[in-house]
Image: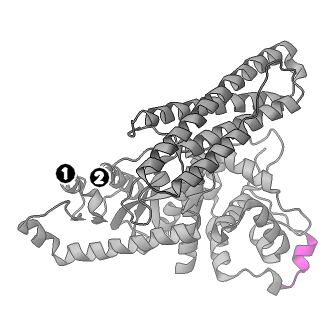
Amino acid sequence: MLRLKDPQLTLWDALLPSDLVQLNPELARVDELLEDDKFMTPFISRFEARLGRPTIPMETYLRLMYLKYRYGLGYEVLVQEVNDSIKWRRFCRIPLTQKVPHATTLIKLTKRCGPGVVEELNKALVQKAREEKIIRGRKLQVDTTVVEANIHHPTDAGLLVDGVRVITRTVKKIQEAGIAIAGAFHNRQRSIKKRIYAINKVLKRRSNEAYQEVREITGTILKTTRKVITEAASIVREAKDTLQQQGDQIKGKIHALVQTLEKTISRTEKIVTQTAAVQEGNLHLPDRVVSIFDTEARPIKKGKANAPVEFGYKVLLQEVEHKIIIGYKVLQGNPADDTLLLGAIEDHIKTFNHPPRALAADRGFGGSGNESGCHQLGVKQVSLPGKGKISKARKAYQSQSWFKRLQRWRAGGEATISLLKRKYGLRRSLSRGYEGTTTWVGYGILTYNLHRLATMV
């Protein structure tokens, strides 16, 4: 059952000295911004208003998520810090006589809301900034960055080891749950671990012969992984037969374990297929799996000297005046930047009901037809540096004062991205999958915008 607010204060809250409960200017302004009822609207359509167990008040949940991303706290640490701070309790609207919501409650609520709620919350905040005439949408800059997935650096052997480890662990849990399984399953983790140690020793030589030895050892691990998959598949078949026979007598946890094992086998089979292709010399795999835990993460090249390849998700950011981010989009795969520009302008028009007067972006967005397309959408000044070697006429065009001024403003957007990565969690997403990463990015940007608006006034 949905609860939006909990307006009742206790006697103890009323008796506290004002110095103990007075919020600092930032939290007081954020509290004022979040008081608007439009921030409660996204939750209404996703919860039953009359049936079920009452949720924690949504105003409390929203303020807790702000503190989490503002200070980079985990859920457990967040609960402890709010529990120990009278001011944070007052900010989150949690009376002294009530317990702070448990960390698992916040995790489940975040998963249930998903990326849709935080996207609507961001739109509501942008709309509020428009109503207060803080932003007018006269200038727009567009850029992309990569949010890393929470995975280790992928190698063929490492991914195979991950698959074997998770399969072995899940089979052991199924056996410990009490299901009678006749088929044998051999734990081959020790032999695979020896092969990994052998690879580490060989790689110290850094020669062509060492590379060939690594491929041979990887081939041995590949054969072992196939044996593990075969035995695990027979375990799944037997477990399904047992579940079908015993029916309601089996707990739901065992059903979940069997589904997890089946999913892990499927993912490991994909890794086996791509590793076999690499062993045969095919190094160009468009749908390469880079993690068994996050199969939607992609290898992305952004041309960075310190990180030639990043593993995660590409994010498109749209920034207007006062460094407010009015839109974001977590992309699947690695689309070229120049294919994203016109769509970003169309989103800007939907938000402000008019095109930006000026647009700035880096060289990656300067594809053929993008500049003329921007003018057709109503943008008067388009600052897009040309790709490759430019003509004298183009060089003179890009030397105009307004063009260079917009490029200097665009350079400031790099600082915004750096701040988002350092302070608001966009360096690495601790949530898995495309939906989890989209939710993570959404709350990071919501927190950034709230803090930005709170410190402007």
Report the magenta stretch's main SS.
helix
Does the image show residue 200? Answer: yes
What residue span does the magenta drawing correspond to?
10-17
Circle 2 residue: 338
Q: Residues within 10 Å of mark 1 (few under 14, many from 20)?
A: few
- Split into 4 quadrants, where in the image is the C terminus? bottom right
In the image, residue 14 lies in the stretch drawn in magenta? yes
The tag on residue 368 is: 1
Of pointers 2 and 1, the one earlier in the residue sequence: 2
What amino acid is at disc 1? Ser
Residues at marks 2 and 1 touching, judged by CB atoms closer than 8 Å? yes
Q: Position of residue 310 (x, y in %)?
A: 47, 55
Task: Give me the C-alpha separation between circle 2 and circle 1.
Answer: 8 Å
Q: Residues within 10 Å of mark 2 (few under 14, many from 20)?
A: some
Seen in the picture, residue 406 relative to 161 is either above or below; the reply is below
Seen in the picture, residue 405 relative to 330 is either above or below; the reply is below
Q: Position of residue 295 (x, y in %)?
A: 56, 41
